[in-house]
Image: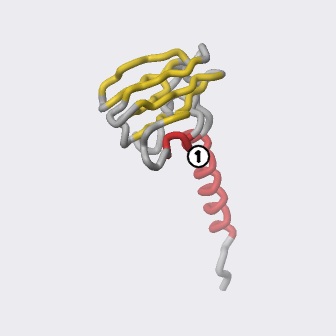
Amino acid sequence: MRLVRPGDMVVFVLAAGLVGASYAYFWGPRAEGDTAVISVGHRPVAEISLLEDATVPVEGLIGDSVLQVEGGRIRFIDSPCPGRYCIHMGWIDRTGEVAACLPNGVVVEIRGGHREFDAINL
Protein backbone atom coordinates (compact mmCIF):
# COMPACT_ATOMS: atom_id res chain seq x y z
CA MET A 1 0.00 0.00 0.00
CA ARG A 2 1.49 3.32 -1.10
CA LEU A 3 1.10 6.38 1.11
CA VAL A 4 1.21 8.89 -1.77
CA ARG A 5 -0.33 7.95 -5.08
CA PRO A 6 0.23 9.69 -8.45
CA GLY A 7 -3.24 11.27 -8.30
CA ASP A 8 -2.39 12.80 -4.92
CA MET A 9 0.68 14.46 -6.43
CA VAL A 10 -1.38 15.94 -9.28
CA VAL A 11 -3.86 17.44 -6.79
CA PHE A 12 -1.00 18.79 -4.68
CA VAL A 13 0.71 20.45 -7.67
CA LEU A 14 -2.56 22.00 -8.90
CA ALA A 15 -3.38 23.32 -5.40
CA ALA A 16 0.10 24.82 -5.02
CA GLY A 17 -0.23 26.50 -8.41
CA LEU A 18 -3.63 27.92 -7.49
CA VAL A 19 -2.29 29.35 -4.22
CA GLY A 20 0.67 30.93 -6.02
CA ALA A 21 -1.52 32.45 -8.73
CA SER A 22 -3.97 33.81 -6.16
CA TYR A 23 -1.15 35.42 -4.20
CA ALA A 24 0.26 37.08 -7.32
CA TYR A 25 -3.16 38.32 -8.43
CA PHE A 26 -4.47 39.70 -5.12
CA TRP A 27 -1.27 40.89 -3.44
CA GLY A 28 0.88 41.76 -6.44
CA PRO A 29 2.14 45.22 -7.38
CA ARG A 30 -0.34 48.08 -7.22
CA ALA A 31 -0.44 51.30 -9.21
CA GLU A 32 1.47 54.30 -7.97
CA GLY A 33 -0.80 56.97 -6.53
CA ASP A 34 -0.71 60.63 -7.45
CA THR A 35 -2.34 62.29 -4.43
CA ALA A 36 -2.43 61.82 -0.67
CA VAL A 37 -5.52 62.56 1.40
CA ILE A 38 -4.73 63.70 4.95
CA SER A 39 -7.44 63.24 7.58
CA VAL A 40 -7.54 64.33 11.21
CA GLY A 41 -10.15 62.80 13.47
CA HIS A 42 -12.00 61.08 10.57
CA ARG A 43 -12.34 64.35 8.62
CA PRO A 44 -10.29 65.06 5.48
CA VAL A 45 -8.27 68.25 5.97
CA ALA A 46 -6.06 68.28 2.86
CA GLU A 47 -5.37 66.58 -0.43
CA ILE A 48 -1.81 67.04 -1.65
CA SER A 49 -0.03 66.10 -4.85
CA LEU A 50 2.75 63.54 -4.66
CA LEU A 51 4.32 65.02 -7.78
CA GLU A 52 5.79 68.06 -5.96
CA ASP A 53 8.33 67.69 -3.15
CA ALA A 54 7.20 69.38 0.06
CA THR A 55 7.19 69.29 3.85
CA VAL A 56 3.66 69.45 5.21
CA PRO A 57 2.82 70.26 8.86
CA VAL A 58 -0.51 68.82 10.05
CA GLU A 59 -2.20 69.89 13.28
CA GLY A 60 -3.42 66.74 14.99
CA LEU A 61 -5.30 66.02 18.22
CA ILE A 62 -2.25 66.15 20.51
CA GLY A 63 0.18 68.27 18.48
CA ASP A 64 1.73 68.79 15.07
CA SER A 65 2.79 65.93 12.81
CA VAL A 66 5.11 66.64 9.89
CA LEU A 67 4.87 64.81 6.56
CA GLN A 68 7.51 64.73 3.84
CA VAL A 69 6.63 64.36 0.16
CA GLU A 70 9.50 63.39 -2.11
CA GLY A 71 9.80 61.51 -5.39
CA GLY A 72 6.12 60.55 -5.62
CA ARG A 73 5.90 59.14 -2.09
CA ILE A 74 5.09 60.38 1.41
CA ARG A 75 6.05 59.59 5.01
CA PHE A 76 5.82 60.90 8.56
CA ILE A 77 9.07 62.56 9.67
CA ASP A 78 7.92 63.95 13.04
CA SER A 79 5.00 63.38 15.37
CA PRO A 80 4.19 63.99 19.06
CA CYS A 81 2.93 60.45 19.72
CA PRO A 82 4.77 58.35 22.32
CA GLY A 83 5.66 55.24 20.24
CA ARG A 84 6.37 57.08 16.97
CA TYR A 85 5.25 54.01 15.02
CA CYS A 86 4.01 56.28 12.23
CA ILE A 87 7.59 57.42 11.58
CA HIS A 88 8.85 53.83 11.51
CA MET A 89 6.18 52.98 8.90
CA GLY A 90 8.38 54.62 6.26
CA TRP A 91 7.44 55.67 2.75
CA ILE A 92 4.10 54.88 1.12
CA ASP A 93 3.40 55.42 -2.57
CA ARG A 94 0.89 52.84 -3.84
CA THR A 95 -2.82 53.40 -4.27
CA GLY A 96 -4.71 52.29 -1.16
CA GLU A 97 -1.72 52.36 1.20
CA VAL A 98 -2.28 54.06 4.55
CA ALA A 99 0.03 55.48 7.21
CA ALA A 100 -1.45 56.68 10.49
CA CYS A 101 -0.52 58.33 13.75
CA LEU A 102 -3.41 57.04 15.83
CA PRO A 103 -2.72 58.92 19.09
CA ASN A 104 -2.60 62.17 17.10
CA GLY A 105 -5.54 61.20 14.86
CA VAL A 106 -3.63 61.85 11.61
CA VAL A 107 -4.21 59.43 8.72
CA VAL A 108 -2.62 59.60 5.25
CA GLU A 109 -4.09 57.58 2.37
CA ILE A 110 -2.70 57.33 -1.14
CA ARG A 111 -5.23 57.86 -3.93
CA GLY A 112 -5.20 57.94 -7.70
CA GLY A 113 -4.24 55.30 -10.21
CA HIS A 114 -6.01 51.95 -10.12
CA ARG A 115 -7.01 50.77 -6.65
CA GLU A 116 -6.59 47.07 -6.00
CA PHE A 117 -8.27 44.97 -3.36
CA ASP A 118 -6.45 44.14 -0.15
CA ALA A 119 -6.90 41.36 2.39
CA ILE A 120 -9.48 43.34 4.35
CA ASN A 121 -12.01 44.03 1.60
CA LEU A 122 -11.91 40.87 -0.46
| Nearer-the-camera pick, 86 or 99 | 86
Return the residue nearer the eye: 36 or 64: 64
Q: Is residue 14 left or right of residue 111?
A: right
Q: Position of residue 111 (x, y in %)?
A: 48, 23
Name the residue type under label 1. Answer: Tyr
Please rate how many residues cluster around mark 1, counting C-alpha atoms within 10 Å: few if below 14, some from 14 to 19, many from 20.
few
Residue at position x 57%, y 18% from top? 54
Residue 21, position as x, y percentages in the image: 61, 45
The quarter of the rendered structure image containing the N terminus is bottom right
Toward the viewer: 30 or 46?
46
- When asked about the image quadrant of residue 28, the answer is top right
Q: Position of residue 82 (x, y in %)?
A: 43, 48
In this rendering, the answer to whether 1 lies above or below 83 is below
Q: Give the secondary structure at mark 1.
A: helix
Q: Position of residue 34 (x, y in %)?
A: 55, 18
Residue at 47% across / 35% down in the picture? 98
Q: Is residue 59 left or right of residue 35?
A: left
Question: Which quarter of the figure is the C terminus placed in?
Answer: top left
* Numbered-mark total: 1
Residue 78 higher or lower than 16, as above or below: above
Residue positioned 43% across, 23% down in the render: 37
Residue at point 34%, 23% (across, down): 44
Residue on which disc 1 sits:
23
Q: Quadrant of residue 8?
A: bottom right
Left or right of 89? Residue 12 is right
What colour scheme governs how the chains and residues are painted in the rendered image of this protein? secondary structure
